[in-house]
Image (cartoon, rainbow, N blue to C red):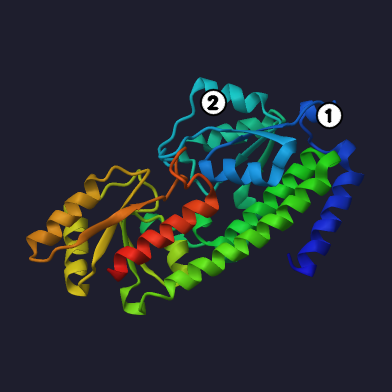
Amino acid sequence: MSRKLKRMLGIVLSLILLTAGCSQTAGKKESGEGSLNVVATTTMLADLAGVIGGEHVSVNGLMGPGIDPHLYQASAGDVERMQKADVVVYNGLHLEGKMSELFENLSAQGIFTICIEKSMDRSRLLISEDDGGVYDPHIWFDVTLWKQAAQGVAEGFAQADPEHGNSYIANLERYLAELDELNAYIQKRAAQLPKGQRVLITAHDAFQYFGNAYGFEVRGLQGISTDSEAGTSDVSALASFIVERRIKAIFVESSVPPKTIQALQAAVKAQGFDVAIGGELYSDSLGGEGSGDETYIKTFRSNIDTIVDALKA
């Protein structure tokens, strides 16, 4: 962690401790009982909350591996879990598109919420003109932005639970160092591909932050939300692009049905060229239990290895 960031977090923590009595704090923590009860929407955020919270939090994730957050609708049980939580962590930027009003209601009820969107340097957020000029929510595909998300969670936990604020900041510092190592690994692996081969084609447009950070040209059949549909003309145009560029591999995603990529592969073949399906990438969720890719760091390492190995072949 940089000296500037340490100093800033120290100031933030001091202010939190001084004003804890006036803060919006969770009911359980007001009485000092047990661990912080945290509900996080996505698998990425559940992992992040667990890393930053450590032994002082109990994390429940709403969405399991392979679940598409763009289309997710909260059940009555989900709403009850969030209403009973000390802290609710969500991405924002319309990732959980069908839950936006719910988060507003939780805040109005006095539930402590951490919105990752508010942790972001907005000048670094990407805007999708193809999707009506909205912000792209897939910020976790740039490790440097995920570091900002981690900082936001640490500061939020310290505010909700001032007693263990120093622990959250210490966990943050350790995690930022691990993220720096991850970022270096991704850059090293990407550099193994000549620039002309760094073309990533997937089912939906989830990887623009990845492309921007690591030098890949990215194309997706659907927009930044899987709510959109890919038409026949979209498939045909992208197939022509693949044939023209002689791209070796395209990729399915763990949280998106493979049929659109399979249709794209067939359209490429109809134009006289064979493109392989290079493997499955994690886009809107982490790997499931037993996959070996259950954490953000393991998932991102798996993604970059799958991409580079397929495009090098």
From the top left corner, tell me how far across and down residue 43 is, in percent: 52, 41
What residue is shown with label 2?
78
Q: Is disc 2 surrounded by few (<14), some (14 to 19) or many (20+) residues within 10 Å? A: some
Residue type highlighted by circle 1: Glu
Task: Using the image as rendered, state which of residue 212 and residue 297 is in the foreground.
Answer: 297
From the top left corner, tell me how far across and down residue 82 is, in percent: 61, 28
Residue type highlighted by circle 2: Asp
Numbered circle sitting on residue 157: none
Residue 159 visible from this viewpoint: yes
Q: Secondary structure at mark 2?
A: helix
From the top left corner, tell me how far across and down residue 85 is, in percent: 67, 28
Residue at left offset 53%, top offset 32%: 62
- Farthest-out residue, right: 18
**Relative to 174, is 120 on the left or the right?**
left
Q: Quadrant of the N terminus?
A: bottom right
Task: Using the image as rendered, state which of residue 220 and residue 227 is in the foreground.
Answer: 220
Q: Quadrant of the C terminus?
A: bottom left
What is the spatial separation of the Cα atoms under label 2 and label 1, in whole angstroms?
Answer: 24 Å
Mark 2 or 1, nearer chain start: 1
**Relative to 29, is 71 on the left or the right?**
left
Residue at left offset 19%, top offset 55%: 264
What residue is shown with label 1?
30
Task: Using the image as rendered, state which of residue 83 and residue 271 is in the foreground.
Answer: 271
In the depicted structure, whether residue 275 falls above or below residue 45: below
Residue at left offset 44%, top offset 47%: 284
Q: Could you tell me how many numbered marks the image carries?
A: 2
Residue 17 placement: quadrant: top right
Residue at left offset 32%, top offset 78%: 196
Residue 218 visible from this viewpoint: no
Q: Secondary structure at mark 1?
A: helix
